[in-house]
């Protein structure tokens, strides 16, 4: 198996950490491979997956991000086509209430959240998974994704006793502890296939660790990027606004260094970016203008379409600089000759101040410097404001140990979500079983369980009081000491079981129930505000100068809102944040032009799409809960879900059944008299082609159409 994989990737010789890890993999042992970026971790993972499939088992590859999932799927498709042509590769990154389509797959690439969802639904093929790859396993330390990854790994180990786990990680200070928890052999190394030179830049002085010094003609990131041209640079900054501003400052410097061929290719890509948008906005235009000049920004405000186009141009080495927020450091594979960390601090809301970046995160950023096969050396440069900050940065980030990975499962929202899921799936049925499961998590291995017993009791009380579970055998609120065995039986109610299956926070389910049972007639704004009030969506911030505006909107919408206004002043602010978010979603369903939405809400296309995607899922979940709680509301929720998905008013719903017709084309057809599918029976191709946005091909498809099922694109 190994020789074929090496031939497929054109690899002549293995790196030392790969050799060591592969020895463990071929002995069917679990392994934790903790090495720097680009040290060949993925090859080891692919070998383990193919060995499992060849042995008649299934493989699963867990990734933290959807974008990474598609990247891995493409690579695995090509690899299995060459090595195991009969093997089927599938991807599962959304739709948390279904398991269909995966039973025939030999290798499944999934996010941790999707794998957790599969465990909650327990499809009969799940125990056939023989190899589980956990990419970026150091993200156990992440307060958002970490608990889900931790519970997923724990449950899979219980479900499949002989499961082979291949965990891939950056180098962390407690890698041995993580390996011990996973029952894995640790392979840890600081080996890099491309050596990394590290330096610190203050004003115009660049000082390398090797003691060499250079004075550059220009200060700031501009000087560092200019010095390295025509090689590529990756610049990390703290904020989205900072990324866009920095890219604009780099544009004139890079523009003059582009070849005519690069300029032509970038112009073509920029044209594609603007032409490919349903509604071209000033955001599209601004990004396209930067692309033409050989630079771009990369942050969560980009849509998937933007992101894919920018990443492709960077991989093709046409973009000479990419300015990104730190989220890219744990994202897709985009190496560069030089990596510049401009901002060593970022805003942390929990501290209400700027805080230093974690050492591990900076190491992840610098690890992207140097492209195997292209560069003899990578360069990682930290920028400092003065000598004092430079000395501190060198001590912390060059000589300091990366932070240990610490379980985040003890946070109340994480406990609330995963305890309900465990009870609903029948994985635990009493306190003893619950403690036993938690003992087997990293949370338990690190000795946190007994220090947070009071929090555990509070979560169980919440689940019981809100009707998500029943607890028999103990008085409500009774404290259970660690040294006593108190027999309590936990059972999920129908409501609690459905909440867990729908993969929403239990508090989301409770919020939806309160709204559906409020007595306020269901209406679009009320239902969208219900969705926005849940912890599963990130609401838009209301600035102080906007507060009065949204207070007035709240009072005017008093009869529509299905959740009561809070008495607490702080909670009232959050209530208005949620109202602002609901109004954005409502404007989307009312077909407000995207450019107008960007200005009204000071947002980005990527943020709009992200909120629309989450709202679509939450409306689906609300519809499923309504079948239990308020059946008469189901139709209203389903209609609103479709409107959110497509961004259309109610009257366009019939046209969505037509092939190739969505928000923009549907409105154009409606405005030209085609208000329903049966309106096309007597329409001619010429007549339809005159409608804006309806090209010749679609006109041919629609002309004379009588039944929606007769024609597909």
Image (spheres, grey):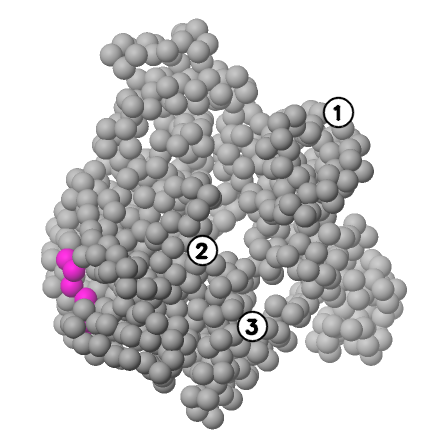
| Number of marks present in the image shown | 3
Residue 309 locus on image (x, y percent): 50, 72
| Label 1 SS | loop
The tag earlier along the polypeptide, 1 or 2, is: 2
Q: Which residues are magenta?
A: 189-196
Question: Which residue is disc 2 drawn over?
Answer: 66
Asked if the residue under mark 2 is in contact with the one under mark 1, i.e. CB atoms within 8 Å, the reply is: no
| Label 2 SS | helix
Residue lying at 29% horizontally and 75% vertically, measured from the top left: 205
Question: Which residue is disc 1 drawn over?
Answer: 519
- Dividing the image into 4 quarters, which one contains the C terminus? bottom right
Image quarter of residue 303: bottom right
The tag earlier along the polypeptide, 3 or 1, is: 3
Q: Nearer the viewer, mark 3 or mark 1?
A: 3
Q: Is residue 199 left or right of residue 426?
A: left
Say which of 61 and 521 sits in front.
521
Residue lying at 15% horizontally and 68% vertically, measured from the top left: 14
């Amino acid at each position: 198996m190994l020789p074929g994989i090496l031939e497929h990737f054109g690899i002549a010789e293995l790196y030392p950490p790969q050799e060591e890890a592969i020895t463990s993999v071929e002995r069917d042992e679990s392994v934790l491979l903790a090495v720097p970026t680009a040290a060949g971790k993925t090859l080891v993972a692919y070998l383990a997956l193919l060995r499992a499939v060849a042995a008649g088992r299934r493989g699963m590859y867990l990734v933290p991000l959807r974008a990474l999932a598609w990247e891995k799927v493409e690579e695995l498709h090509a690899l299995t086509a060459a090595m195991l042509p009969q093997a089927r590769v599938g991807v599962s990154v959304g739709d948390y209430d279904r398991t269909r389509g995966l039973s025939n797959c030999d290798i499944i690439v999934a996010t941790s959240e999707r794998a957790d969802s599969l465990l909650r639904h327990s499809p009969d093929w799940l125990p056939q998974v023989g190899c589980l790859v956990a990419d970026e396993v150091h993200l156990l330390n992440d307060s958002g994704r970490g608990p889900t990854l931790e519970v997923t790994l724990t449950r899979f180990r219980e479900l499949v006793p002989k499961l082979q786990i291949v965990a891939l990680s950056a180098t962390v200070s407690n890698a041995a502890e993580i390996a011990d928890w996973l029952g894995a052999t640790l392979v840890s190394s600081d080996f890099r296939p491309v050596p990394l030179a590290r330096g610190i830049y203050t004003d115009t002085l660049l000082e390398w660790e090797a003691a060499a010094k250079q004075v550059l003609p220009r200060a700031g990131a501009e000087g560092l990027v200019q010095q390295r041209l025509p090689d590529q640079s990756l610049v990390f900054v703290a904020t989205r606004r900072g990324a866009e501003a920095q890219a604009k400052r780099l544009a004139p410097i890079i523009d003059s260094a582009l070849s005519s061929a690069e300029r032509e290719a970038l112009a073509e890509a920029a044209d594609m970016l603007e032409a490919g948008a349903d509604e071209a906005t000033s955001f599209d235009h601004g990004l396209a203008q930067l692309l033409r000049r050989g630079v771009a920004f990369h942050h969560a405000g980009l849509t998937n379409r933007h992101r894919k186009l920018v990443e492709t141009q960077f991989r093709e080495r046409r973009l000479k600089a990419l300015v990104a927020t730190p989220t890219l450091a744990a994202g897709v594979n985009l190496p560069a000759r030089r990596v510049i960390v401009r901002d060593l601090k970022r805003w942390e809301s929990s501290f209400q101040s700027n805080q230093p970046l974690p050492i591990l995160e900076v190491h992840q950023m610098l690890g992207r410097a140097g492209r195997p096969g292209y560069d003899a050396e990578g360069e990682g440069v930290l920028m400092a404001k003065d000598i004092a900050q430079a000395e501190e940065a060198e001590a912390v980030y060059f000589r300091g140990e990366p932070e240990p990975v610490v379980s985040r499962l003890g946070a109340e929202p994480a406990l609330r979500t995963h305890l309900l899921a465990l009870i609903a799936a029948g994985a635990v049925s009493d306190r003893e079983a619950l403690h036993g499961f938690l003992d087997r998590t990293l949370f338990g291995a690190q000795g946190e369980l007994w220090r947070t017993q009071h929090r555990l009791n509070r979560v169980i009380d919440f689940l019981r009081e809100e009707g998500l579970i029943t607890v028999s055998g103990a008085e409500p609120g009774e404290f259970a000491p660690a040294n006593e065995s108190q027999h309590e039986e936990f059972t999920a109610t129908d409501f609690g079981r459905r909440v867990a299956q729908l993969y929403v926070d239990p508090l989301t389910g409770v919020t939806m129930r309160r709204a559906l049972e409020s007595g306020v007639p269901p209406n679009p704004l009320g239902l969208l505000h219900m969705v926005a009030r849940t912890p599963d969506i990130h609401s838009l911030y209301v600035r102080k100068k906007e507060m009065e505006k949204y207070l007035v909107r709240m009072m005017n919408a008093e009869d529509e809102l299905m959740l009561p206004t809070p008495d607490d002043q702080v909670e009232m602010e959050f209530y208005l944040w949620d109202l602002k978010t609901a109004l954005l979603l409502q404007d989307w369903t009312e077909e407000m032009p995207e450019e107008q939405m960007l200005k009204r809400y000071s947002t980005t296309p990527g943020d709009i799409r992200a909120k629309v995607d989450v709202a679509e899922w939450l409306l689906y979940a609300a519809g499923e809960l309504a079948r239990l709680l308020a059946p008469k509301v189901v139709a209203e929720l389903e209609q609103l879900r479709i409107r959110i998905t497509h961004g259309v008013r109610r009257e366009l719903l019939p046209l969505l059944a037509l092939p190739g017709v969505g928000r923009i084309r549907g409105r154009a057809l409606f405005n030209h008299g085609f208000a329903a599918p049966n309106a096309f029976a007597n329409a001619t191709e010429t007549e339809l082609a005159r409608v804006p946005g309806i090209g010749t091909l679609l006109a041919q498809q629609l002309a004379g159409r009588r039944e929606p099922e007769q024609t597909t694109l």
